[in-house]
Image (cartoon, grey):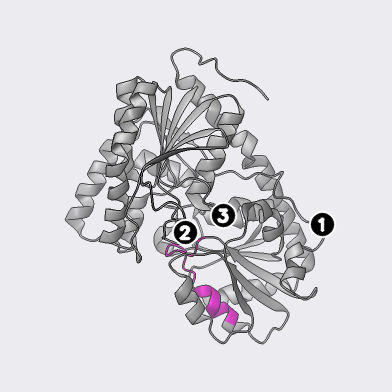
């Protein structure tokens, strides 16, 4: 098959949508497919263009067998509200000629990853002009999140934008999303059942294993053997309610055997550092190399997964898959009944969002019960192996793409 992947964020970004788009493209190439990617220069999660990408602004490069076409975009120093909308629109405009050029390549499938939904019209147009099938993959319901979190405001504006979103969704041959609740959201937005697919975020369970020994990070960071590490790893953004972490650390400052490690970068980092000032039990680290992800996640005795209540069931955190694969228990802050609560309650603990005392209690309960930590971590690992393994998830995606084509595209070469 010839596949165009339209995703503003793309590897070598080590986290989030960029990581998943990169892994998907690389895997498809390994199966013998031809893949072209339309994306922006690396800028996430620091909201700053990566070194060396200031010029040329449009470029074509090869990455692990993937044909990558990059178009520029405006990167605001402080994203939010109108600035974020203009940021997304800038890439939709600059990438349009790059997208239309792909019509001459005659792809079989055009896959648009949202965010950003503003790229979807161009992706749909390319598919129709080239005779390809159009697939829209929803990583989060960005329209709903923007209004729920106050990034966009106004009842009339919401009605108009929601109407446009629903019309756009219904035009695609396939619309997929990452959780059962988000799939249900597609139904509520009027997408026909025959066009809906469940396409969860995956994890390389071979790369991320349950460590049977202390992580190498413990020695490097000079963490005592009897210290319990409570780890948050990922983008430090505004959808996660991260301020609860320094609040909990303050409540548990009397426990010298507990260390909170916050690993990542993003717009919330300066605020979190200010909130944790003076706390000896909190340590900040930058994003760690992807090749060390197994050791990094294995540093945790407990994973923290905070989430803002305004984003629940509109976003399923992509970092959850790696946490589960690491074989460590997870504590999530979310409301009962959400899909995140449904998954985490089987392999960790769930507490109400933004409730620091309850979260502190949950941390203490796991810190003081090694047997329970081990049992819950093993259940999480089993869930990752059964439902989120890379080969199974991407193999199903590949099969779904093949089924869309009028005749089999016999271009696959098994390695």
Mark 3 and mark 1: span between their CA atoms?
A: 22 Å
**Disc sitting over residue 212 in the figure:** 1
Mark 2 and mark 1: span between their CA atoms?
A: 31 Å
Is residue 242 part of the magenta span, yes or no?
Answer: yes
Residue 212 point in image, percent of width and height: 82, 57
Q: Nearer the viewer, residue 88 or 318?
A: 88
Nearest to viewer (mark 2 / mark 1): 2
Q: Which residue is mark 2?
A: 45
Earlier residue among tags 3 and 2: 2
Asked which secondary structure carries label 2, the reply is loop
Earlier residue among tags 2 and 1: 2
Asked which secondary structure carries label 3, the reply is helix
412 relative position to 39: left or right: right
Name which residue lies at 34% across and 33% down.
Answer: 99
Residue 126 point in image, percent of width and height: 32, 28
Q: Which residue is mark 3?
A: 319
For residue 342, say whether it is visible: yes
Which residue range is magenta in the image?
Answer: 235-249
375 versus 187 height, above or below: below
Quadrant where the C terminus sits is top right
Name which residue lies at 42% across and 56% down.
Answer: 49
Secondary structure mostly taken by the magenta-highlighted segment of the chain: loop
Q: Could you say which quadrant of the image residue 26 lies in?
A: top right
Asked which secondary structure carries label 1, the reply is loop
């Amino acid at each position: 098959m010839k596949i165009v992947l339209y995703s503003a964020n793309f590897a070598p970004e080590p986290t989030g949508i960029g990581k998943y788009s990169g892994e998907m493209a690389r895997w498809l190439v390994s199966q013998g497919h031809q893949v072209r990617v339309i994306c922006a220069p690396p800028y996430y999660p620091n909201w700053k263009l990566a070194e060396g990408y200031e010029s040329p602004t449009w470029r074509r490069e090869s990455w692990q067998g993937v044909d990558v076409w990059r178009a520029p975009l405006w990167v605001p120093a402080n994203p939010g509200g109108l600035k974020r909308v203009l940021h997304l629109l800038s890439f939709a405009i600059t990438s349009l000629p790059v997208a239309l050029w792909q019509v001459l390549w005659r792809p079989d499938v055009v896959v648009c990853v949202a965010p950003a939904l503003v790229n979807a019209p161009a992706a749909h147009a390319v598919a129709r002009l080239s005779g390809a099938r159009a697939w829209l993959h929803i990583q989060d319901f960005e329209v709903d999140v923007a209004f729920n979190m106050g990034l966009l405001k106004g009842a009339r504006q919401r009605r108009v934008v929601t109407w446009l979103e629903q019309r756009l969704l219904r035009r695609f041959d396939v619309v997929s999303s990452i959780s059962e609740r988000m799939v249900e959201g597609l139904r509520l937005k009027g997408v026909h059942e025959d066009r809906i697919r469940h396409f969860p975020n995956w994890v390389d369970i071979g790369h991320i294993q349950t460590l049977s020994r202390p992580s190498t990070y413990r020695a490097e960071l000079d963490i005592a053997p009897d210290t319990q590490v409570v780890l948050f790893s990922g983008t430090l953004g505004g959808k996660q309610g991260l301020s609860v972490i320094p609040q909990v650390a303050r409540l548990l400052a009397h426990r010298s055997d507990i260390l909170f490690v916050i690993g990542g970068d993003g717009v919330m980092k300066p605020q979190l550092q200010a909130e944790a000032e003076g706390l000896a039990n909190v340590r900040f680290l930058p994003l760690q190399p992807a090749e060390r992800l197994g050791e990094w996640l294995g540093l945790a005795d407990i994973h923290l997964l905070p989430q803002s209540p305004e984003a629940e069931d509109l976003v399923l955190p992509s970092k959850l898959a790696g946490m589960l694969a690491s074989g460590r228990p997870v504590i999530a802050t979310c409301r009962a009944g959400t899909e995140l609560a449904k998954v985490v309650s089987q392999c960790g603990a769930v507490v109400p969002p933004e409730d620091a005392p309850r979260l502190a209690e949950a941390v203490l309960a796991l810190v003081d019960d090694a047997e329970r930590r081990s049992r819950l971590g093993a259940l999480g690992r089993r869930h990752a192996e059964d439902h989120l393994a890379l080969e199974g998830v991407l193999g199903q995606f590949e099969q779904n793409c093949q089924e869309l084509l009028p005749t089999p595209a016999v271009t696959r070469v098994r390695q």
